[in-house]
């Protein structure tokens, strides 16, 4: 059975948001892109720095420390998709009660 972690009410993640949070042992960055909630690790796979401090343009989040850019839907490194590991992405859903939940394991 899937393990979902409650991270708060849907109102805490308004359209356009970029919210850094920590739940259990996972640091996440949550995004709301026109109503679609997305979650990625808040640890840049290139150098372990906080990725969520970076700038987002569309689907691309750029690490503020080394400039590596990642697609927040797929996790792929934009500039070096075959040479660098992707940033982990996580499944997100909203409950009928308006709570946002993130899957405990990264997407496959």
Image: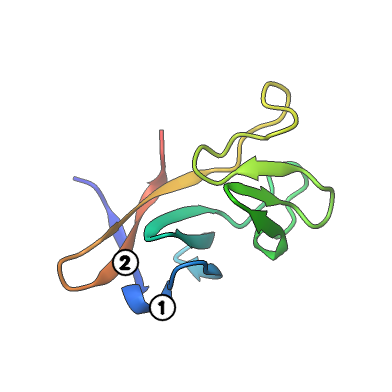
**Residue ID at (17%, 73%):** 97
Where the N terminus falls, by quadrant? top left
Say which residue label 1 marks. 12
Around disc 2, counting alpha carbons within 10 Å, would you say few (fewer than 14), some (14 to 19), or many (20 or more)? many
Q: Position of residue 93 (x, y in %)?
A: 29, 56
Q: Position of residue 28 (x, y in %)?
A: 53, 60
Residue 51 is tagged as none
Q: Is residue 108 visible?
A: yes
Occupied quadrant, residue 68: top right
Q: Please give left or right for residue 66 compared with residue 100 in the image.
A: right
Are the two marked residues, 2 and 1, in contact with CB atoms closer than 8 angstroms? Answer: yes
Q: Please give left or right for residue 108 compared with residue 68 in the image.
A: left
**Residue ID at (65%, 53%):** 57
How far apart are the two marked residues, 2 and 1, measured between alpha carbons? 9 Å
Q: Position of residue 20 (x, y in %)?
A: 57, 68
Say which residue label 2 marks. 100
Q: Position of residue 41 (x, y in %)?
A: 56, 52
Q: Describe the element under mark 1 as helix, strand or loop.
A: helix
**Residue ID at (49%, 61%):** 31
**Residue ID at (35%, 78%):** 11
Where the C terminus falls, by quadrant? top left
Q: Describe the element under mark 2 as helix, strand or loop.
A: strand
Relative depth, front residue between 95 and 36: 36
Around disc 1, counting alpha carbons within 10 Å, would you say few (fewer than 14), some (14 to 19), or many (20 or more)? few
């Amino acid at each position: 059975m899937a393990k979902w972690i409650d991270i708060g009410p849907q109102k805490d993640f308004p359209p356009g948001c970029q919210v850094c949070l920590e739940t259990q042992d996972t640091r996440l960055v949550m995004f709301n892109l026109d109503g679609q909630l997305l979650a990625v690790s808040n640890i840049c796979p290139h150098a372990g720095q906080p990725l969520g401090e970076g700038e987002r343009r569309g689907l691309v989040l750029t690490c503020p420390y080394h400039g590596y850019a990642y697609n927040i839907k797929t996790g792929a490194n934009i500039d070096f998709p075959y040479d660098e590991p992707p940033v982990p992405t996580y499944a997100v859903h909203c409950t009928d009660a308006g709570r946002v939940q993130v899957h405990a394991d990264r997407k496959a």
